[in-house]
């Protein structure tokens, strides 16, 4: 969540959950600017996504198109992350992952 990808990206398509950032595919222009600055190497073009990370593709879509816990409706495609600000909620998959120490321990 260092947000370097958000700062580098020319369009406002990267949304902030509670512990993860999510790319709104309908708003993304596929420029690739965010990929090299991602500190955890979590951004891939769809065709380049390794098999062991496939579940995250569906999970990323779920962030936008399913109603997340504590929300009344899906995030959808609001036309930019700045319009809604940090969502503060993650998908069940991300929420179930062990929390990582920000110190790297």
Image: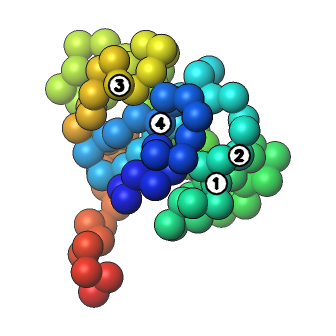
12 relative to 102 in the view: left or right? right
The first of marks 3 and 4 along the sequence is 4
User: Label 3 belongs to which residue?
Assistant: 82
Question: What residue do we see at 81% from left, 46% from top?
Answer: 47
Q: Element type at marker 3?
A: helix
> Which disc number belongs to residue 32?
2
User: Label 1 belongs to which residue?
Assistant: 35
Q: Can residue 67 be seen by looking at this rendering? A: no
Question: What is the distance, in whole Å, between disc 3 and disc 4 at their CAs?
Answer: 9 Å
Q: Nearer the viewer, residue 24 or 49?
A: 24
Question: What is the distance, in whole Å, between disc 2 and disc 4 at their CAs?
Answer: 13 Å
The first of marks 2 and 4 along the sequence is 4
Question: What is the distance, in whole Å, between disc 2 and disc 3 at their CAs?
Answer: 20 Å
Residue 58: give x, y in percent of width and height.
57, 38
Question: What is the distance, in whole Å, between disc 4 and disc 1 at their CAs?
Answer: 12 Å
User: Which residue sits furthest left?
Assistant: 70
Q: Quadrant of the C terminus?
A: bottom left
Q: Quadrant of the N terminus?
A: bottom left
Q: Nearer the viewer, residue 13 or 74?
A: 13
- Mark 2 neighbour class, 10 Å CA radius: few under 14, some 14 to 19, many 20 or more: some
Mark 2 and mark 1 in contact (Cβ < 8 Å)?
yes
> Which disc number belongs to residue 55?
none
Residue 34: give x, y in percent of width and height.
60, 49
């Amino acid at each position: 969540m260092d947000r370097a990808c958000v700062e580098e990206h020319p369009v406002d398509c990267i949304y902030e959950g509670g512990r993860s950032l999510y790319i709104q595919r309908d708003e993304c222009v596929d420029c690739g600017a965010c990929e090299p600055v991602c500190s955890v190497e979590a951004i891939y073009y769809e065709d380049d996504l390794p098999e062991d990370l496939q579940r995250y593709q569906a999970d990323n879509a779920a962030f936008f198109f399913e109603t997340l816990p504590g929300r009344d409706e899906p995030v959808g495609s609001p036309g930019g992350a700045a319009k809604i600000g940090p969502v503060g909620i993650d998908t069940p998959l991300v929420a179930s992952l062990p929390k990582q120490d920000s110190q790297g321990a």
